[in-house]
Image (spheres, grey):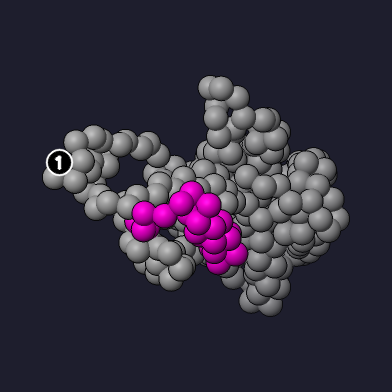
């Protein structure tokens, strides 16, 4: 994974600051939620607790991903961040269902809610979560950082909704608005959680990277001068921002100096058009029948050549 450092600070520094601020806000939400009898505020505390865990896991993942590759971890620790993002997303889903359960109970027996306290605490949350979201947005773009960013964006929106809900309670005196608002927060949590689960599972299952269409990759390679055919094409993600590709390319029976030019052109094309930098490309000048590896038919040669991904 490439950890970008620009804007207001490195991911490590931003995550550390975010952790401290989020912990303070969780305590404030719990105290205020209990005093105001507001399930919406307590839901926000749960939401922010999942954010705290998300940020903590992201920080651990950033440390792990900075470790170099070794003879036993030849790709390094790129997927540590992906695993952290998956754990974060699953925790979000669990929090959402707990909120749904509590909201159902509150709808049956609404409690008196201090709407003014709700609004004041939520206003502080909008400022805090918005600031953290901005810092995360400017510090990195991999799936691990984006999972933490989604937590914060979701919190910013949900705390803004709490302000609106507090105003509605003050205006109407209807306390059922509080648990209904909590359900809305839960739906938002669930939506963001499922999105990250889907993306991380795709990476772990070595699916085609998000935003990449394999047929377009094949077309681009075929368009390069000297390429006669492309097959056994695979594209996957090592980490959230590290894409890999392997394929067989049929070329004419030409000197290595010319084939080197074709290889260079292919790599440049993959880098500029698809941001694919880790490639394993096998050149062939005979027909290749792909079956449990790459086997040259007996009529064209009695040897086999294998490859691994």
Query: Dot 1 lies on which element?
Result: helix
Q: Which quadrant of the figure contains the N terminus?
A: top right
Residue 95 in view: no
Residue 233 lies in the magenta-colored region: no
**Residue found at the far right of this picture:** 8
Q: From which residue to which does the magenta span run?
A: 250-275
Q: Identify residue for label 1.
A: 298
List x then y, in percent, for residue 25. 77, 47
Residue 295 is at least partly visible in this image: yes
Residue at 76% over, 54% down: 139
Q: Is residue 23 left or right of residue 154?
A: right
Magenta segment includes 264: yes
Answer above or below: position of 151 versus 221: above
Q: Nearer the viewer, residue 309 or 24?
A: 309
Q: Is residue 94 above or below residue 68?
A: below
Q: Main secondary structure of the magenta part?
A: helix
Q: In the image, 211: left or right of 115?
A: left
- Seen at 44% across and 42% down, the residue is 204
Depicted 102 relative to depicted 168: above or below: above
Tell which of 11 and 41 is nearer to you: 11
Q: Residue at x 46, y 67 (%)?
A: 224
Q: Residue 299: x percent and y percent?
A: 13, 45
Q: Work out which quarter of the rendered image holds the C terminus and state it.
A: top left
| Residue occupying image coordinates x 54% and y 38% | 79
Residue 202 drawn at (x, y percent): 42, 50
Q: Is residue 303 above or below residue 236?
A: above
Give x and y (percent) for residue 18: 78, 46
């Amino acid at each position: 994974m490439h950890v970008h450092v620009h804007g207001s600070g490195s991911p490590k520094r931003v995550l550390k600051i975010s952790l401290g601020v989020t912990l303070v806000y969780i305590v404030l939400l719990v105290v205020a939620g209990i005093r105001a009898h507001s399930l919406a505020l307590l839901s926000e505390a749960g939401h922010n607790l999942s954010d705290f865990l998300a940020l903590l896991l992201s920080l651990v993942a950033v440390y792990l991903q900075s470790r170099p590759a070794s003879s036993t971890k030849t790709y390094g620790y790129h997927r540590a961040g992906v695993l952290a993002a998956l754990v974060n997303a699953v925790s979000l889903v669990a929090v959402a269902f707990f909120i749904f359960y509590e909201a159902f109970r509150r709808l049956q027996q609404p409690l008196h809610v201090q709407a003014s306290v709700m609004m004041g605490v939520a206003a502080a949350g909008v400022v805090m979560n918005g600031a953290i979201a901005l810092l995360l947005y400017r510090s990195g773009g991999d799936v691990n950082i984006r999972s933490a960013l989604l937590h914060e964006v979701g919190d910013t929106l949900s705390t803004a909704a709490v302000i609106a809900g507090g105003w509605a309670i003050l205006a109407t005196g209807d306390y059922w608005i509080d648990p209904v608002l909590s359900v809305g927060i839960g739906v938002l949590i669930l939506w963001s959680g499922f999105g990250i689960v889907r993306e991380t599972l795709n990476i772990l299952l070595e699916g085609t990277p998000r935003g990449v269409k394999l047929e377009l990759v094949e077309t681009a390679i075929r368009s390069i001068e000297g390429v006669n055919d492309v097959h056994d094409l695979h594209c996957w993600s090592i980490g959230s921002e590290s894409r890999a590709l392997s394929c067989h390319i049929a070329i004419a029976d030409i000197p290595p100096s010319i084939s080197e030019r074709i290889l260079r052109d292919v790599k440049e094309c993959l880098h500029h058009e698809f941001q694919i930098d880790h490639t394993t490309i096998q050149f062939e000048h005979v027909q290749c029948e792909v079956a449990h590896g790459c086997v040259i038919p007996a009529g064209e040669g009695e040897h086999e050549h294998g490859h691994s991904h």
